[in-house]
Image: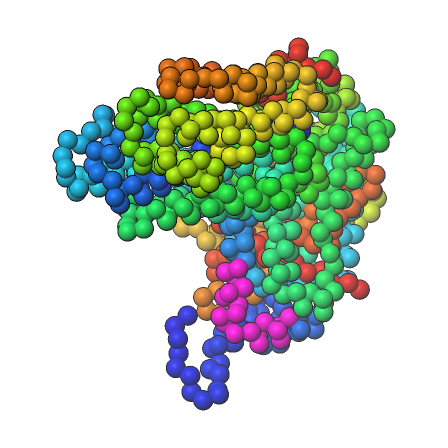
Amino acid sequence: MPDSPQTGDETPPEQSLFANYRYDPRFYDEMFEAQAAPREHCRDLWNVLDGMAPEEIAAMQERAERSFLQEGITFAVYGEEGAQERIIPIDVLPRIVDAATWDSIERGLRQRIRALNLFLADIYGRGRILTDGVIPVDMILGCPQYRIEMRGVSVPRGIYVALCGTDLVRTNDGFMVLEDNLRVPSGVSYMLANRGAMRAALNKLFRQYRVRAIEHYGNLLRQTLSELAPRAIADPCIVLLTPGVHNSAYYEHMFLAREMGVELVQGRDLLVHDGFVYMRTISGLRKVDVIYRRVDDDFLDPLAFRPDSQLGVPGLFYAYRLGNVVIANAPGTGVADDKSVYAFVPDIIRYYLSEEPLLANVETHLCRNPESLEYTLDNLENLVVKMVGESGGYGMLVGPASTPAERDAYAKELRRDPANYISQPVLDLSCAPCLTEQGASPRHVDLRPFVLTGHETRLVPGAFCRVALVEGSLVVNSSQGGGGKDLWVLPE
Amino acid sequence: MLSRNAQGLYWISRYLERAGHGCRLVQIQYRALQDRTVDELDRTWARLYLSLGREPLGGRLGSNLDDEDFMFADAYTLTDDLTFESDNADSIRNCIAAARENARQVRNVIGNEMWTSLNLLYLGMRDLGVEDIWSDRTGNFFVNTQDSIRGFFGIADNSMYRDNGWHFLQLGRFVERAQHMTALLDAQLEIFPSARRHVESDWRSLLQIAFARGAYSRLNSLDFKPGPVVDFLVSDRLLSHSIRYALEHISSSLDVVSEQRPLAVEARRRAGRVAASLDYDWPNRDPGDDTATRATLGTVSNACRRLNEDIEASYFNYEIEDSPR
């Protein structure tokens, strides 16, 4: 920021962080209820931040970024040259969620994951929901994420999804689930790293707000994984299976292994012998009981899935079927977070739990239906269109932000394989203040809480809050250049 | 401990030790640039390259000119070759990058402080070229880099739990040190045979490379003669850069890790045999007989190479059939 001449004691108004903040009534603002009027629970934060000199805030931002680089909190964006090890952008202005709001989110998530686990057990078992005609059979059996190999496999306690990271957005109509990530959700380390950086930067405020702790996530994760062990073992051997240092989320794998105090293994560290999985240690082979895998289904076992996989362990699926090792999440969970199955989750909740969904879904048009396809094609510039099997913001068209040429090209693809697409209205995602060159400015945000399921369902009161760093942008995915900020959940 | 983690720790310290040694060689050579003749410099460059088993860039060394500009141009090119050359697998930067890559693989078993110090060392060097460090104080770069490397080992010393991981870090460090010290002594005797009239500075600089000049002067004299200098660097048990010292540390770390892994018995025996021969046979040698001395160095060097193979085969890449379950 350029030096401006000081006149007397008067502080020029543009010096304060929120001086140029423009409250936008079209979107729910996480901090303000009107221009320059912070919400009740944000008032103290606002006071402190607004009272800080711009240099202080800039220094805080710089410290956070430097600590990320030193720690190696990085993320690789595929397909981008020289993108190896870019730090994940952090925004230092925290977002606050009050106790009542969090409570309703938490109850909604517990309900949702319970239903999804029952759903997975059903479709890999008797398939009642399909024979009852609640969901089209071909949508499930034809889904590339449906693993026929999982039919009839006994999954301990029916816990297919032990870990999930659900993306929630707040709109003018309240919270909605944007997607369920039920395969290998990532981001939890960024949640903890953001917390670490913010705790250092705003320690006093932390105490003042009595922000609820999330640092015990590693303990909960380990406990959850222990509970999945195939036999009643006092101290099961748990490992975290990573594709290796070149994976975009390697930092997280390393971080979680260290938090849990378990070995971080790659495929080549493991082998299957007589139906059991072993890892290669300096004192010989050691039996492995639970594998928290961060490797996709396709690459888990070259004998069962993709034969060209270098990341997996030959025979792993065999050992799994025998019940000698537990893989979390179970193979084949991706079918439940397929974007067309997503549209049925409210029905799934009603079907298995006989309850009304506590968290709303986003209105979704399945392009497999001719009338929905027509509707989508007619309204491309007002819709968000997604490919059903993709995640991470890949293969997506954001209508209002697209050019006619992009829409034409996309429409062509869409017509070729309609069942592969869904469309949703453009959401009025809530905004939160983020630090920009012009001081605080509203940016769209979402949040991803992490839900663990073992003997019981557990979650820490926190989430990875993702930020679309580009003004007006709705895309928050880290892989698309989004960033993160700390989320503070307040006690009752 | 996971085999791959043990292997990672072993290679972190091997690469860092190698980088540190490279820095020390260049630093001492650079110091010589200030007051030695072109002729003398040629020979110390030759010692340096021979000890690293590398051909100098552009072939044979040997400036026939009494031309100081030429001498500095040479030094510039050679420094670049040893420090930043990407095709030189053992260049200082490549070694540090390799150490850091290994550290990235095993980050969950090393502390944050160890990682951060290594990561910063790497980040600080990643984008440099010889033109960035070439100045009146080029030596500083090499001194600072060595400091950072020692900083890493210092953090390890003061923070690591003394389990197997620690001992693999020690093994890598001292296997590497024993190897480069034998290679350095061998190159010294090749370039400066002890029968020939010796120039003291050639032997003083050898001691300097091994951080041994002060101790040597205190214990012996200010007379830097081939026989006593070689003896000191090979067999002194208290000198941290002597071969004997390295072997002792290798043996004691092997003692710990092989408690769990009898496959390594052979490696222990090998290290013990070499150490014993330095204790009992070495003192009886004829100090003037370079051939015999170099044969002994060859034995040590071979033993180190075999040790490395033993460690790899018994801990990292063993056959499944050989493994107890």
Where is residue A59? Give x, y as percent: 51, 65
Is residue A144 visible from the viewing direction of this image? Answer: no
Magenta stretch in the rendered image:
A45-63
Magenta residue check for A37: no
Please give the name of the residue rendered at 60% of the width and 24% of the height, measured from the top-left corner. Answer: B251
On screen, residue B172 versus residue B88, left or right, reads right
Q: Is residue B28 above or below residue B14?
A: below
Q: How is the image coloured?
A: rainbow
In the current view of this chain or complex, which residue is farthest to the bottom? A8
Residue furthest to the top = B321
Which residue is at the front of the view, A415 or A83?
A83
Picture quadrant where residue A135 is located: top right
Q: Residue at x 55, y 69 (%)?
A: A24
In the image: residue A398, left or right of residue A267:
left
Whether A146 is drawn above or below B29: the answer is above
Q: Can residue A114 be seen?
A: yes
Secondary structure that dominates the magenta span:
helix
Q: In the image shown, does B144 or A207 lie closer to the viewer?
A: B144
Image coordinates of residue A163 in percent, x first then y, are 71, 40
Q: Horizontal and vertical percent for residue A86?
A: 48, 46
Identified at 47% across, 77% down, the residue is: A14
